[in-house]
Amino acid sequence: MDIDRESEILEEQPEKKVYQFGNYPNYYGYRNAFNNFEMDERIKWLKDVVPFQGKRVLDIGCNSGFATLNIGKHLESSLVVGVDIDESLIVKATKSLKMDYSLQRPVLKENLEDYSDEEDFEHYFPMSCVIKYGSLPLTKPIVKAQKSEYPFNTKFITVDFLNDSHDLLKEPFDSINWDMISLSLTKWIHLNWGDRGIIELFKRVYNCLNPNGHFILEAQPFSSYQSKARITQLTKDIYRSIQFKPEQFKEYLLSNGFRLIKTIQVPEGSLQTKGFKRPIWVYQKI
């Protein structure tokens, strides 16, 4: 092969994407043994511990939105907002929301006479129509906090929560009683922004929560950092500088306005794959 042509071919090869922030496109496929769109196991474990009904929930680092959609659909929260630094994941999550909305079936009733075409079938869109025409648009605006109709209680936004000055931290969101969720996020903040980044995350969480609001934290152990620290030179350097280890997070939070109300251990028989069977800590702002 001509050397110049070989060089051209090599230059044409797309660069392999580096998931520096843990923004893997198939994240929920990695962590669930069977990714079959059933309710996220963690949500099942949490729903008897945290009062989601009627609450406003912020899911930080939502990835493709699987857990966010579960909360919005099944737990009657008044507002559920998923945020992620990766816009492509937010696009994917929004598409999933539209698809799920399109495929919702009408409520079954005993008598045919009980059905009203306008009320019961207005938003039903069979799979055959989705394949042919695409999913239905979310035509209604996001509802006010006192309502909890899915999917209009659920929204996805591209945000760098740690650094962006976004409306989430201003009016009207500063009056929202956020119940925070930070699932599988701390390692990536730690590797990209170091100890200062983790402390800033905890401060922002505290400032955005209402009194008695909940902070749900699933922190990766420090032993899992090393393999991911190789992603970039920056993460390598930051990894070597880390002094504030995950086992110290509890002491810090308890000394800075939180109390621990529950530690959830992954039960036997869980579908969580190896590497994801870690405890979930439920803190409350005091």
Image (cartoon, rainbow, N blue to C red):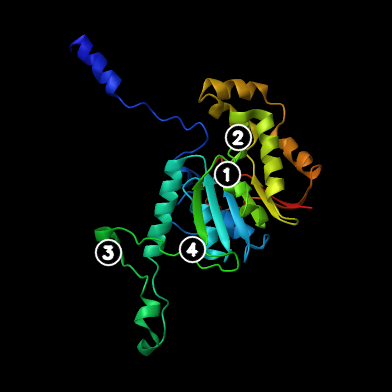
Q: Residue furthest right?
A: 255
Q: Residue at x 47, y 49 (%)?
A: 33
Mark pair 3, 4: CA separation = 21 Å
Residue 233, percent from left and from top: 53, 20
- Residue 76 can be seen, yes or no: yes
Q: Amino acid at mark 3?
A: Cys
Q: Quadrant of residue 120?
A: bottom left
Binning the other alpha carbons within 10 Å of mark 2 as few (below 14), some (14 to 19) or many (20 upward) gives many
Q: Quadrant of residue 11?
A: top left
| Contact between labelled residues 1 and 2, with CB atoms less than 8 Å apart | no
Q: Is label 2 or label 1 in front? A: 1
Q: Residue at x 24, y 20 (%)?
A: 9
Viewer-side residue, 30 vs 170: 170
* 198 versus 243 height, above or below: below
Binning the other alpha carbons within 10 Å of mark 4 as few (below 14), some (14 to 19) or many (20 upward) gives many
Q: Quadrant of residue 218?
A: top right
| Contact between labelled residues 4 and 3, with CB atoms less than 8 Å apart | no
Mark pair 2, 4: CA separation = 30 Å
Tag 3 secondary structure? helix
Total numbered badges shown on the rendered structure: 4
Binning the other alpha carbons within 10 Å of mark 1 as few (below 14), some (14 to 19) or many (20 upward) gives few
Q: Amino acid at mark 4?
A: Phe
> What mark, if any, has residue 78 been given in the picture?
none
> What mark, if any, has residue 129 been given in the picture?
3
Mark pair 3, 2: CA separation = 42 Å
> What mark, if any, has residue 152 been given in the picture?
4
Q: Which residue is mark 1?
A: 166
Q: Which residue is mark 2?
A: 189
Q: Residue furthest left?
A: 1
